[in-house]
Image (cartoon, helix red, strand yellow):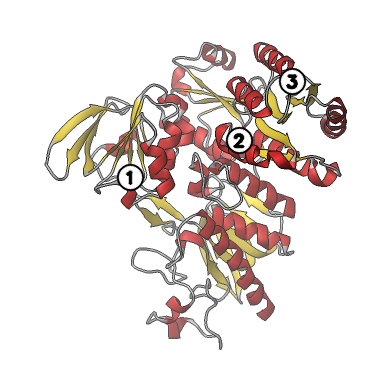
Amino acid sequence: MKLPYIIIVDDDTQVLRAIQRDIRNEYRDEYKVAATDSAVEALELIRELKLKQEDVAIFITDQRMPEMEGITFLEKANEIFPDAKKILLTAYSDIEAAIKAINTVKLDYYLLKPWHPAEEKLFPVVNDLLNEWQALYKPDVDAIRIIGFQWSPKSHQLKEFLSGNLVPFTWMDIEHHPDAEKYLLSAGVTPTDLPLVVFRDGAFMTDPALSELAKKVGLQQKANREMYDVLIIGGGPAGLAASVYGSCEGLKTLLIEKSNPGGQASSSARIENYLGFPNGLSGAELSQRAITQTLRFGTEILTPQEVKNITLQDGYKITELMDGTVVHSKAIVIATGVAYKKLEIPGLDRFTGAGVYYGAAAVEAQACRNEDIYIVGGGNSACQAAMYMSKFARSVNILIRRDALSQVAANYLVENISKTPNIQVIPHTDVIACSGSTILETITLKNSETGEEKTVPAKALFIYIGTKPGTGWLNDIVLKDEKGFILSGSDVTKDQAYPMLWKLNREPFLPETSVPGIFASGDVRYGALTGISSAVGEGAMAIRFVRKYLQEV
């Protein structure tokens, strides 16, 4: 396997040698390190690397150089290797230029000189960025390959699963990729057997179940312990936060996720209002950081795995999984979040995964290149998807029922969309019909004010409307409201069943349900604030009360 490059540029020879030495000593086993004192030579080098099909993971460049400024170099380098991470070396007087570069060249980090000791000031920054780059890096040779039909629901499911679990893969459309047929011939399969998954070791599977695929790629399927301090159900931001805080505080922690860790957040193409990330980050990047962090602290993650039933025995929680296995724990945190509601249009279900998608914009973006697509819904998630898809699609049409996007979306997103020429907001509009042979081809729109109807071609329809709590699996062991949201804290005490269910001398803790030791966290909890930051806070808060509960038993 080819080693990716780290490119260093600084016209000060002494500085160049010092940082080259530090970087090479730390990363030479996994990366090639190339250094030059000329920005022009560096550009020639990266053009040559591109022709040789090499990869660049990160650029580290000085700002003040005689041939061209560092920001200008990064702009030119970004045209050739747009996915490479970018660090600007600056003096204190150049901080203003570095901050501007966050927007102009999507700078990932600016590092003040001097950076010594490297173990404290340089390596943590570079490690973080390299981990982030590796999570999304798809090597051309060594990655898993999925061969299938572009608009196949089965292919979409596999892509979404691997992407959500941060497993690199290469997608090959059987109808357009020049090498796809070669894999069918080698595997001895026909197009009717697709999708085909080919692994690095040459093994392959046709139309695999997610559990089979997970086992092959090394995802954990079975719990390793007899008893856990806390079991977390759901791997969205709330669940991941709970797992991080649980494990780092020494609790034996198990997290169960039925599909992709990260929840709805993992499909967000760009999150720009998350504290501490001024240039934004994708949902996949945020999920990758959280997963890496919680695994480092010792959390076990089972995926894909679903909970079938929860029962109680002598205060212990017995959780039965869909595969028949059982997990014992002292406490449970339910963090199953919410799911987008289905668009109730006759016949729409047959196009799900074949042109109709609930979220998943980042997964299917490449398939929508130079196409006309539609997004139903005008909330923040819909707007983030529109901004991302505008880089690929010919036109992105946002359908909303209200007068203006500003009534339902954050101001910064409304402003960004207004400045994007290929995004159009269509108010007072509903989708009332869809059609196509085997894949979505057209949709019919209706103006709610005029009653006018029109049918338009649509390659893809992405749906971001309303939410429903992820409690369809949950039995009646805990109290819920009429919509399925889990009651907790003081809301439990207001329910007429409270005196019959709650037998402790204290009232339920803020995130505690009608069952002592079972907690709800994030969007699934009745009355919770929505949003990624709120979910993360709720996950951390839940663990605080889990510890209080464990001190009682």
323 lies left or right of 439: right
Q: Residues within 10 Å of mark 1 (few under 14, many from 20)?
A: many
Quarter the C terminus occupies: bottom right
Q: Position of residue 409 (x, y in %)?
A: 37, 49
Camera-side residue of 449 and 90: 90
Q: Amino acid at mark 1?
A: Gly
Camera-side residue of 339 and 313: 339
Q: Quadrant of residue 233?
A: bottom right
Q: Position of residue 66 (x, y in %)?
A: 73, 22
Labelled pair 3, 2 in contact (Cβ < 8 Å): no
Q: Amino acid at mark 2?
A: Ala
Disc 3 is placed on an element classified as loop
Residue located beneath label 3 in the image: 2
Camera-side residue of 328 and 56: 56
Disc 1 is placed on an element classified as loop
17 lies left or right of 507: right
**Residue appearing at x 86%, y 34% in the figure:** 22
Quick one: label 2 or label 1, which is nearer the N terminus?
Answer: 2
Camera-side residue of 489 and 148: 489
Quarter the N terminus occupies: top right
Residue located beneath label 1 in the image: 377
Q: Residues within 10 Å of mark 3 (few under 14, many from 20)?
A: some
